[in-house]
Amino acid sequence: MKKIFVSILFSILLFSCSKKAETIDTKVLNEQFDKYKEGFVIGLWEINPDWAASQGYHKLDSVLVVSDSLGIKKELDFSHAQLDSLQHYSIDDLSDNNIIDYYIIKNQLQSSIFRIDKLKSYQWNPAEYNVCGAFAEILNGKYDSLDVRLHSFYLKMNAIPAYYEAAKSNIKNPTLEHTSLAIDQNLGGLSVFEKDLLIALGKSKLAESEKKAIKNRSKVAINAITTYANWLKDLDNLNPRSFRIGEDLYREKFNLDIQSSYKADTIFKKAVDHKKELHKKMFVLADKLWPKYMKTEPKPLDSLVVIKTVIDKISLQHTTAQKFQSTIEKQIPELVTFIEEKDLLYIDPSKPLVVRREPDYMAGVAGASISAPGPYDKNANTYYNVGSMKGWSTEKSESYLREYNDYILQILNIHEAIPGHYTQLVYSNQSPSIIKSILGNGAMVEGWAVYAELMMLENGYKNSDEMWLMYYKWNLRTTCNTILDYGVHVKNMSQDDAMKLLTVEAFQQKAEAEGKWKRVTLSQVQLSSYFTGYTEIYEFRDLLKKEQGANFNLKQFHEKFLSYGSAPVKYIKGLMLKELKK
């Protein structure tokens, strides 16, 4: 008996020690991984100093990376080396947050390798080469004194000629669409050097000799940018590459960019089905609103014509081109008040949101966007960039304003600002994981903004048949973004078929549809992020509501969901479900 007792006691002690050692090893492993992440981020910034600056890390502001063969090899070597380093960590022993960070880092590295080795957009997309935005951010920044920022500006300009020479060496049979965009954006961005820089120098306390040196170097920069644009104009591009990337590249890019639990073809099918559902709901509302707006006019037999007729009538209610930006500014406080009254989500009043005209160097792709500060610069302004209609014809402006009528403009503000992108990105910057902030998942970010639109209306925001009809029209845009993106790049959808989809089936104005066609020729997969993220978030919320019943709290769900930063929805879902089961 004594021997048996001693044997059992020894086994217990041995088990306890091994468990204790295992606990210590797990803790040490996570501490080591945290240190690895710090080193990874610093290495990432050395490869991408402009990206670093956009996140609020300004130690490398004076550096302009030249993407010549050595620069591309350096990025590729970095990605392979970091993937090797990740293999030293056992995924099973990492904490929940570190597991997500592990997958996000791995995905980022694989994306970088994919872009260089397979997509090779640096060869066919001349718009990837544009220094104007990075230099504009230095001038607009508030993170240091103007004189210090101008010094970085001066040093950074030194590499501009080599930067554009490398671009010309890399480019082979570019697409016509990206070539045109590169010319427009580079020439548009010249104002940074020709106007904005001079204004900044006028405000600075630099010595006249320093100002002169900066002006002289800016002339060299202006010449390099102009020369690049002219080179593109004169390029003998007899065999331009198609902007369509094809099924294989699209599928792989979708998996890497979206990081969804769904595959690209599944999301496409879901979007097609959702379009049919929206058409049914819209007809019910349009049929109800017909007497109000169309009086005794005969009702067409075609349901899509009925919907379009009522939408066109309601769309005549809109602001003017001159008041477009000011109208947006006035609506922001209304959204904040509604959220507070309904207790839907905490919004930090100390984080400023500034509505501004879209800078010239950003023009050409989207009409409204958010530029948010990074995790290193959390107190900087968040900008709501509003597209300008300056120089547009009366017809084009009117078409645009009908698209963004009095109802849809409010939905746009929910999406871009509150509680959409602006709010989500404020939460993301508060995330304890810098990885989730800097490597934010586009489908989660866009999906949240789309989810916020429906959530606000579900809770009674400006409730009316008109608002719901216009919301469905807006949500149809999100849905058709996916159909368009997949259809064009995988199924070779023609421009005529695309315009029919957007104007006839999605009821978009001609100007909006033309802009969306331009966008799909200049981007790939990103247009699918909206519907994908929205679908996953909404399905997850419905799952929790069914499981928790009366215990489900919408505000708690929102704040918990956003607390994980801009991580892929499938990982946030996994962690939240795991925590609820504890």
Image: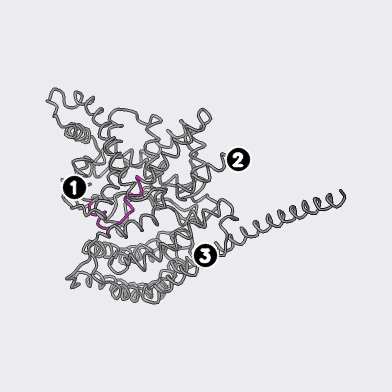
User: Magenta stretch mostly in which secondary structure?
Assistant: helix
* Residue 499 tag number: 1
* Mark 2 or mark 1, earlier in chain: 1
Please tell me whether mark 2 sits on a helix, a strand or a loop. loop
- Does residue 424 appear left or right of residue 403 in this picture? right
Please tell me which residue is depicted at 53% across the width and 67% down the height of the picture. 85
- Disc nearest the viewer among 2 and 1: 2
Q: What amino acid does circle 3 point to? A: Phe
In percent of width and height, residue 498 lies at 20, 49
- Mark 2 — residue? 582
Mark 2–mark 1 Cα distance, whole angstroms, equals: 51 Å
Name the quadrant containing residue 286: top left
- Does residue 558 appear left or right of residue 187 in this picture? right
In percent of width and height, residue 45 lies at 47, 66
Mark 1–mark 3 Cα distance, whole angstroms, equals: 44 Å
Please tell me whether mark 3 sits on a helix, a strand or a loop. helix
User: Do the residues under discs 1 and 3 have CB atoms within 8 angstroms?
Assistant: no
* Mark 1 or mark 3, earlier in chain: 3
**Residue extending furthest left?**
298
**Pointer 2 local density, CA inside 10 Å: few below 14, some 14–19, many at least 20:** few
* Along the line of sight, the residue nearer the viewer: 13 or 33: 13
Q: What amino acid does circle 1 point to? A: Met
* Residue 40 tag number: 3
* Along the line of sight, the residue nearer the viewer: 386 or 481: 481
Location of the C terminus (image quadrant)? top right
* Along the line of sight, the residue nearer the viewer: 481 or 274: 274
Magenta residues span 517-531
